[in-house]
Image (cartoon, rainbow, N blue to C red):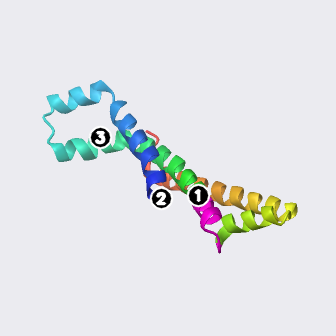
Amino acid sequence: MIFITAIWPIIINTTEGVRQIPQDYNNVSRVLRLDRKTYFFKILFPATVPYIFTGLKIGIGLSWLAIIAAEMLIGGVGIGFFIWDAWNSSRMSDIILAVIYVGVVGLLLDKFITFLASLVVSED
């Protein structure tokens, strides 16, 4: 379930990244007669990496929400079950605490992907 939730934003953003490659890059690759491997590593991949990381950021956020929703449905353990149990017991302070926790973990996941992207993506 988590994989299905996360994969679509990544695929859609990667596809859009490939479509946004400037035509000049493709023309230069044809003039230089770059083979597929060189084209992939020198033109295609560097041009699409920012889009891939955008998809990863969206996908990891959706995955985090899917995990919590699955825990609410299945029950037993996890922050989703904790929120659902607190809701059924009318413990508003626990719900607020859990929502803050969910937000902080989501923010940390987002910042982690942003950090990874800054290591990979060059700002030329």
User: Circle 2 sits on which residue?
Assistant: 1
Q: Tell which of 16 and 3 is nearer to you.
A: 3
Residue 121 x/y as whole percent: 44, 47
Q: Secondary structure at mark 2?
A: loop
Figure check: 53 above or below 83: above
User: Circle 3 sits on which residue?
Assistant: 44
Amino acid of disc 2? Met
Alpha-carbon span between mark 3 and mark 1: 30 Å
Which of the 4 quarters of the picture holds residue 90? Answer: bottom right
Q: Tell me the crowding category of disc 2: few under 14, some 14 to 19, or many 20 or more residues within 10 angstroms, Cα based.
A: few
Q: Secondary structure at mark 3?
A: helix
Q: Residue at x 60, y 67 (%)?
A: 74
**What range of the chain is rendered magenta?**
67-77
Amino acid of disc 3? Leu
Mark 3 or mark 1: whose residue is earlier in sequence: 3
Q: Residue at x 83, y 66 (%)?
A: 89
User: Circle 1 sits on which residue?
Assistant: 64
Residue 91 x/y as whole percent: 86, 64
Q: Residue at x 49, y 58 (%)?
A: 2
Q: Is residue 109 visible?
A: no
**Horizontal relation, residue 85 to residue 53: left or right:** right
Q: Main secondary structure of the magenta part?
A: helix
Residue 87 belongs to the span the image colors magenta:
no
